[in-house]
Amino acid sequence: MTTETPAWHALSGEDALSALDSNRVGTHAEAVQRFERHGPNALPIAAGVHPIMRFLAQFNSALTYFLMTAAFAAGLLGHLVDAVVIAIVVLVNAVVGFAHEGSPSLAQKLGEGAIM
């Protein structure tokens, strides 16, 4: 015998509450019982990516490969200033991307204690 999960988004509020055997006003005893049955109301903690791997991932794009190839070619042709400028642009892009990508994970870590 299989039980199908209802399409929660399609149910009215009253139908969803009755399917969960709940009501709009819960008691403390009901909250304790649900806590014991379902566990705490918390988001799962995602496994973090090491900062070095996050930084190196910034270089994994077609545009970065193209720019690094251009810097290498410019260096081979004797245009060292152009090669250095292109390499600095790629490095600055990686640093900005790393910082930008790290800010949501920092915000998540700071907010973990507030979501309880």
Image (cartoon, grey):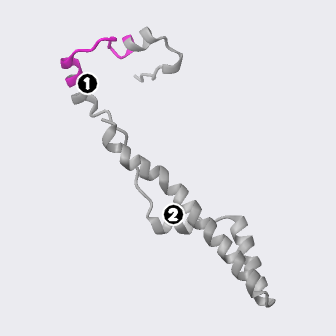
Q: Could you say which quadrant of the image residue 38 lies in?
A: top left
* Most foreground residue, 16 or 103: 103
Q: Residue furthest left?
A: 29
Residue 86 in percent (x, y) is at 71, 75
The residue depicted at 32 percent of the width and 33 percent of the height is 41
Total labels: the figure holds 2
User: In the rendered structure, does residue 20 fall within the stretch colored magenta?
Assistant: yes
- Sequence-wise, the earlier of marks 1 and 2 is 1
Residue 45 in sight here = no
| Residue at the image position 30 percent from the left and 35 percent from the top | 116
Relative to 22, say whether 1 is above or below. below
The boundaries of the magenta stretch are 18-32
Residue plotted at (22% across, 18% down): 30
Residue beneath label 2, please? 54
Q: Residue at x 72, y 65 (%)?
A: 63
Q: Residue furthest top?
A: 14
For residue 11, above or below residue 60: above
Horizontal and vertical percent position of residue 112: 34, 44
Q: Nearer the viewer, mark 1 or mark 2?
A: 2
Q: Which residue is mark 1?
A: 34
Residue 47 screen position, x and y as percent: 40, 54
Q: Find residue 3 and report its horizontal and vertical position in percent.
A: 42, 22
Q: Nearer the viewer, residue 55 or 39?
A: 55
In the picture provided, is 39 more to the left or to the right than 29? Answer: right
User: For the residue labelled by badge 1, is the local secondary structure a helix, a strand or a loop?
Assistant: helix
- What kind of residue is marked 1? Arg
SS at mark 2 in the image: helix
Which amino acid lies under the numbered mark 2 shown in the image of this protein? Arg
| In-image side of 9 versus 39 (left or right) | right
Q: Residues within 10 Å of mark 1 (few under 14, many from 20)?
A: few
